[in-house]
Image (tube, rainbow, N blue to C red):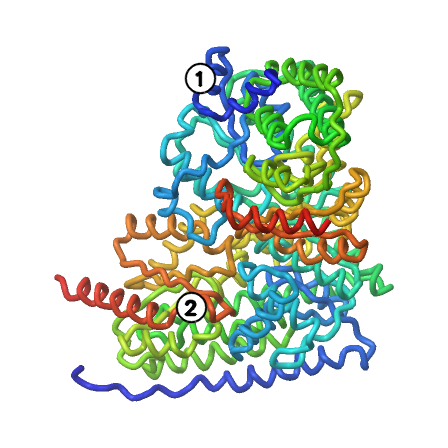
């Protein structure tokens, strides 16, 4: 489908996409996590761009982060130090895990970009005091943007950005749901590219193209090849080969609990509330990542409901090596899946490094077991 | 060596501390028989409200240190790995998670908690660890969320943490079915402040040359300010310890015979190699006079109001060493380098502790630029011996000491 091509190309190379965005006069603010309030960045007249590790070898980041730091954190720092992110005007670091927390310090201390902000969000998201705090953190970030850019972000600006990002979420949810119900309609790597691309490219362009993709899908013949339905769980998955391998083995990824997947477009920002309250409320109600807390069983409950909703046959955990929050949750999540008779398998990998032979064999075996 | 100094006498207070800790653990282990409640709490967590409400605080991290020192870390960590926990996770957490199931470790496991208190001012790991234990023991969990002060403490953080201090007390009142006595809370607050002030005084004694004790002693004597903070026992003990250390200073007794070189240690101890490391450095007439770890239990004194403890608790517990930015941590390290007048910095790159270890390389650069002293980084793990290569560490320590000696020899 030709509408999907720009999404595949958004990060290849990233600098071309960045150059096109800069031509529109927008400054580019990078962020490494799905808890970044893109709407605020956009309402400030800037372009929010999610940072992924380009997967180049670690050379300069070795001087700042030890080898037992995850590949995403090391990779992003390497890209910055190597000048591959020189198009950035600034970055914002939402607080998530310990590694990201320290990356933010190291980034600030070795800072190469004009704007920098930490967004120390609450870890607990279900208490009255965290609700008030969360909103105040967003208000401070808004003020920081206003001061740095010498602008004023009006409620109307913010409402317009919220509406735009909600449209992106709505389109992605529709496309994802359609794709999940009819695996084979588009490839998993296409779905992955649509999501990743939408985090990178100009959002006005993204929303138009996603609307086109959604419209095209409605008219496509629905495939009826039986497949084994798989849910992915983990942090980031920036490995298109994974989707191809699952499909080659007779499976399809029909849902995910990833911050580079459904977690990113889960829930709309309410459009009938004061904008900052609405942004805060979405974070409170959105599916959480394991560095946040809303209850002792929230993540397992969500995963099981996702499996049920997507009628998945099994769960494939894509575990990033040295990712503490996910590694702590894994035994419990597996135990809950086991108790429900849901098969699962864990693949431990470094971001962007795909061991084709070994992973193919394991995935094929897993799919055949389902 | 012109003369071989004799081995200095041991610090007498050590025996007393062992006895106090034994009594404390016996009391904790028999809490249920005595109708007392037990709360597990993170090492950086605000223990004072528990003490004020007569709840026995128990520290899985202190227990983790005991497991490491008793060289029981490998087996327990491996057991956790069998349970599905990655070998890359914090070894305190792995050892504790396994210990809860197998009732292992040096004291046959910790007493079952009635509640869990998790303060994330030291790391995000404790949140995940306590979630796991709350599910396992099926007891209520209170999370005191202390936002990281990357570049400072904001009014938003102050309001948020203060609100949680009230929620914390309400939680304790609900779990115990008792109201908190404000007078008792104030008294505990004052004792906590006093204990921390005395602990700082203990650590300050090592600024003297030769140092009457080392960081290895501080790692040991730390147990009381962690576990019995807010009690008269800790206050009395540290007064006694200070008197003994001052006497040693008066008598010219150094802990390292012929102390020639003074070093600063960064990060948690390597619990399973304390003696080996101590001997290794002593053999070079080098004394680890101070460390960034043990001072964490008095570093926030400046934010504390002993007469209004509860109110100042939010700030004091949020602005601790591990919850600030790496540049501010570097400033603290520089202050210690000056105060203790050290010749070198030894950094433990600790696979178990990412918030402590990531950023160390930037601190190392800053220290080198601003002081010119040599810096050594040793790769290890505080509890799991599988991440430690003794021969490699030995070679690196010897090379590091050579550089320090050469630097000293140069006019």
Residue at the image point whose x is 56% and y is 59% from the top: B89
Instruction: Judge whether B164 appears above or below B246 on screen.
Output: above
User: Mark 2 falls within which chain?
Assistant: B
Instruction: Judge whether A317 appears above or below A117 on screen.
Output: below
Residue A284 image label: none
Residue closest to the eye, B385 or B36: B385
Where does the image place residue A287, in percent across and percent down from the top left? 73, 39
Q: Which residue is mark 1?
A: A19
Where does the image place residue B117, in percent across and percent down from the top left? 71, 60
Where does the image place residue B51, in percent across and percent down from the top left? 71, 68
Quarter of the image for residue A184 reads top right
Could you tell me how far apart the alpha carbons at marks 1 and 2 are, in whole angstroms? 47 Å
Residue B388 image label: 2
Dot 2 falls on a residue whose secondary structure is: loop
Where does the image place residue B277, in percent across and percent down from the top left? 38, 74
Instruction: Judge whether A183 appears above or below A300 on screen.
Output: above
Quarter of the image for residue B18 reads bottom right
Is the Cβ of the residue at disc 1 closer than 8 Å to that at disc 2? no
Residue at the image point whose x is 80% and y is 57% from the top: A339
Residue at the image point whose x is 71% and y is 37% from the top: A255
Q: Residues within 10 Å of mark 1 (few under 14, many from 20)?
A: few
Give left or right: position of B286 versus B104: left
């Amino acid at each position: 489908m030709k509408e999907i091509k720009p999404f595949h190309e958004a990060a290849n190379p990233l600098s071309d996409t960045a150059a096109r965005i800069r031509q529109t006069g927008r400054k580019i603010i990078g962020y490494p996590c799905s808890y970044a309030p893109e709407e605020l960045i956009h309402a400030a007249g800037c372009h929010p761009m999610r940072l992924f590790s380009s997967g180049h070898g670690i050379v300069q980041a070795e001087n700042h982060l030890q080898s037992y730091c995850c590949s995403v954190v090391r990779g992003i720092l390497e890209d910055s130090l190597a000048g591959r992110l020189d198009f950035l005007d600034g970055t914002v670091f939402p607080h998530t895990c310990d590694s990201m927390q320290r990356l933010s310090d190291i980034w600030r201390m070795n800072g190469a970009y004009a704007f920098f902000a930490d967004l120390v969000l609450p870890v607990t998201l279900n208490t009255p005091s965290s609700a008030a705090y969360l909103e105040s953190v967003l208000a401070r970030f808004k003020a920081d943007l206003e001061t740095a850019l010498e602008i004023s972000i009006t409620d109307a600006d913010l409402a317009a950005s919220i509406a735009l990002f909600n449209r992106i979420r709505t389109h992605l949810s529709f496309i994802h749901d359609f794709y999940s119900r009819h695996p084979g309609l588009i490839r998993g790597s296409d779905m992955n590219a649509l999501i990743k691309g939408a985090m990178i490219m100009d959002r006005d362009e993204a929303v138009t193209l996603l609307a086109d993709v959604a419209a095209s899908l409605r008219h496509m013949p629905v495939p009826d090849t039986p497949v084994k339905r798989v849910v992915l769980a983990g942090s980031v998955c920036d490995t298109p080969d994974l989707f191809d391998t699952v499909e080659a083995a007779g499976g399809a990824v029909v849902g995910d609990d990833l911050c580079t997947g459904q977690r990113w477009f889960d829930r709309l920002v309410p459009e009938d509330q004061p904008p900052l309250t609405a942004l805060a409320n979405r974070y409170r109600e959105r599916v959480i990542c394991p560095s946040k807390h809303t209850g002792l069983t929230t993540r397992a409950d969500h995963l099981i409901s996702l499996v049920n909703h997507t009628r998945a046959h099994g769960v494939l955990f894509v575990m990033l090596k040295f990712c503490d929050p996910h590694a702590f949750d894994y035994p419990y999540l597996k135990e809950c899946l086991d108790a429900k008779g849901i098969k699962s398998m864990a693949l431990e990998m470094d971001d962007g490094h795909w061991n084709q032979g070994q992973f193919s064999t394991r995935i094929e075996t897993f799919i055949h077991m389902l | 060596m012109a003369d071989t100094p004799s081995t200095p006498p041991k610090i007498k207070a050590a025996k007393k501390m062992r006895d106090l800790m034994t009594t404390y653990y016996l009391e904790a282990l028999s809490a249920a028989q005595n109708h007392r409640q037990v709360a597990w709490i993170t090492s950086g967590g605000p223990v004072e409200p528990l003490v004020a409400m007569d709840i026995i605080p128990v520290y899985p991290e202190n227990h983790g240190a005991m497991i490491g020192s008793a060289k029981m870390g490998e087996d327990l960590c491996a057991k956790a790995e069998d349970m599905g926990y990655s070998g890359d996770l914090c070894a305190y957490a792995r050892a504790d998670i396994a210990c809860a199931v197998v009732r292992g470790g040096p004291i046959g496991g910790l007493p079952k908690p009635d509640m869990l208190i998790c303060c994330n001012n030291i790391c995000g790991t404790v949140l995940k660890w306590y979630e796991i234990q709350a599910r396992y023991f099926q007891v209520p969990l209170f999370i005191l969320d202390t936002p990281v002060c990357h570049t400072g403490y904001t009014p938003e953080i102050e309001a948020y943490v203060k609100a949680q201090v009230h929620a914390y007390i309400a939680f304790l009142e609900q779990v115990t079915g008792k109201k908190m006595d404000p007078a008792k809370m104030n008294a505990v607050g004052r004792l906590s402040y006093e204990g921390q002030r005395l602990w700082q005084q203990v650590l300050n004694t090592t600024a003297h040359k030769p140092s009457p004790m080392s960081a290895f002693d501080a790692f040991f004597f730390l147990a009381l300010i962690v576990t019995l903070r807010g009690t008269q026992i800790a206050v009395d003990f540290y007064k006694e310890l200070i008197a003994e250390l001052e006497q040693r200073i008066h008598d010219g007794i150094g802990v390292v015979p012929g102390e020639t070189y003074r070093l600063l240690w960064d990060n948690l101890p390597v619990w399973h190699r304390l003696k080996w490391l101590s001997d290794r450095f002593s053999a070079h007439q080098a004394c680890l006079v101070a460390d960034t770890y043990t001072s964490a239990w008095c570093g926030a004194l400046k934010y504390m109001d002993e007469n209004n403890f509860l109110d100042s608790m939010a700030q004091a517990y949020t602005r601790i060493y591990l919850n600030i930015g790496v540049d501010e941590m570097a400033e603290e390290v520089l202050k210690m380098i000056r105060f203790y007048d050290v010749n070198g910095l030894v950094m433990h790159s600790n696979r178990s502790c990412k918030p402590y270890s990531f950023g160390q390389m930037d601190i190392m650069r800053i220290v080198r630029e601003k002081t010119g002293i040599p810096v050594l980084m040793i790769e290890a793990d505080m509890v799991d011996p599988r991440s430690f290569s003794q021969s490699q560490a030995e070679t690196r320590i010897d090379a590091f000491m050579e550089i320090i000696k050469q630097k000293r020899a140069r006019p």
